[in-house]
Image (cartoon, rainbow, N blue to C red):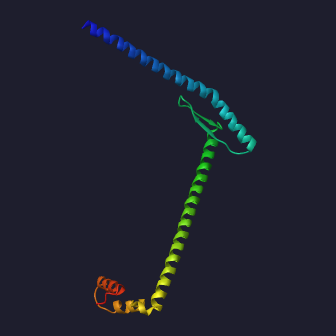
Amino acid sequence: MEAEQEQHEPQNSDSMEAEQEQHELQNDDQRARETSYKKRNPTVMKKANELSQLCNIPVCVISYGPDGNVDTWPESRDDVVELLNKYKEHNDEKLFEMRLNSLKTKLCVMKNRIQLLENKKRKWCNNNNNNSTTGIPNNNNYYDQVGSSSGSSRAKVARAYKLMNNEYY
């Protein structure tokens, strides 16, 4: 028993050491991120200021630090909120415009399809009306035969189908 306990103790201490090393690496990583953020964030804010002044444009920077603090440029919260609202309005208008253009395109495609179908229908009707040797009655003849008959709409549809397929009753 004592030998087994001695074997387990080194494994426990090895695993504890490994966990400690991993924890230290994570802490080192966290410290490195914090240090990097503290060094670079002022530079980013300075560049935002330069961009705003040199190009005479509104600029906003919002950064969340590793400690959870929020840094903004410009420092005035009202200026940041105003700029964010402008951005949102612009985005909403742009989205609306994109959707409207998409609908216009779909409408144009549908109109073209309708025109093509109407042209096909016109050609088909002209061919059938001018070609009496086909044995297919013209559309008016269908209407006369189906419309004047008595019965339900379903029966009329069935008779029209038979007439169109040369299945006279």
Toward the left, the furthest residue is 1
153 to the left or right of 92: left
Toward the right, the furthest residue is 54
Q: Which one is nearer the viewer's eye here, 125 or 111?
A: 125
The image shows residue 145, relative to residue 91, as above or below, that is below
Q: What residue sits 27% from the left and 7% below the top?
A: 3
Q: What residue sits 74% from the left and 44% below the top?
A: 55
The image shows residue 54, relative to residue 164, as above or below, that is above
Total marks placed: 0
What is the x, y in percent for residue 143? 38, 90
Toward the top, the furthest residue is 2
What is the x, y in percent for residue 33? 56, 26
The image shows residue 40, relative to residue 92, as above or below, that is above
Q: Which one is nearer the viewer's eye here, 90 or 26?
A: 26
Q: Splitting the image into 4 quarters, where does residue 12 fall?
A: top left
Q: What residue sits 61% from the left and 39% below the top?
A: 77
What is the x, y in percent for residue 24? 48, 19
Quarter of the N terminus within the rendering: top left
Quarter of the C terminus within the rendering: bottom left
The image shows residue 91, relative to residue 130, as above or below, that is above
Q: What residue sits 53% from the left and 69% below the top?
A: 109
102 to the left or right of 52: left
